[in-house]
Image (spheres, rainbow, N blue to C red):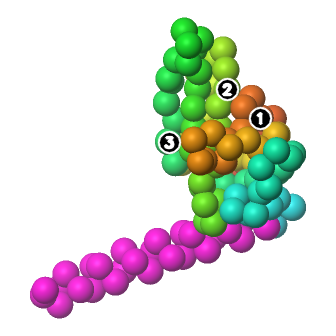
Amino acid sequence: MSLRSRIAESLASNEQVRDTEERADASRNVGCAAVTSLPVRSRGKVAGVLRSVVLRPREGVPTVEAELFDGSGALDLVWLGRRTIDGIEPGRRIRVEGMVCDVDGRRTMFNPRYELRPRPGE
């Protein structure tokens, strides 16, 4: 591996670590729990960044699904009966609150209350 490749890999790794740390700090700063500490079958509040947003019908019902990442882990967000939600897009910072469920081994919130957070620099 060339020196240039090692430097690029190191910079990318450092950026990922800093990004993860910033997201975890942001989650703590707004009074939210870390995704990995959320108990299933209880109400929870989490803040993080949306990694992905897709329209995926469930049993014929339009559904917006998103993955929130907070630095500790991922939480699936599911809004039933929706085709789109203004502001819900990849890269967006968000705070959500709702009942935490386990769906196929993944923490999930259905129809959570949400607050769009400012993007860095806004």
The answer to whether residue 120 shows anywhere in this view is no
> Residue 78 got which mark?
none
Whole-percent x, y for residue 61 in the image: 59, 11
Whole-percent x, y for residue 80 in the image: 67, 20
Secondary-structure class at tag 2: strand
Whole-percent x, y for residue 50 in the image: 58, 46
How crowded pointer 1 is (Cα within 10 Å; few <14, some 14-19, many 20+) is rated as some
The answer to whether residue 59 shows anywhere in this view is yes
Give the residue at mark 2.
Answer: 79
> 33 or 25, which is in the foreground?
33
Secondary-structure class at tag 1: loop
Specify which label sits upstream in the sequence, 1 or 3: 3
Give the residue at mark 1.
Answer: 112
Whole-percent x, y for residue 17 in the image: 51, 76
Q: Looking at the rendering, which quadrant does residue 62 occupy?
A: top right
Q: Which amino acid does label 1 sit on?
A: Pro
Give the residue at mark 3.
Answer: 52
Specify which label sits upstream in the sequence, 2 or 3: 3
Relative placement, left or right, of 29 versus 26 is right
Q: Main secondary structure of the magenta part?
A: helix
Relative placement, left or right, of 54 versus 21 is left
Q: Which amino acid does label 2 sit on?
A: Trp
Q: In which quarter of the image is the N terminus?
A: bottom left
Region of the chain picked out in magenta, as a range: 1-28
> 90 or 58, which is in the foreground?
58
Is residue 68 located in the magenta-colored stretch of the structure? no
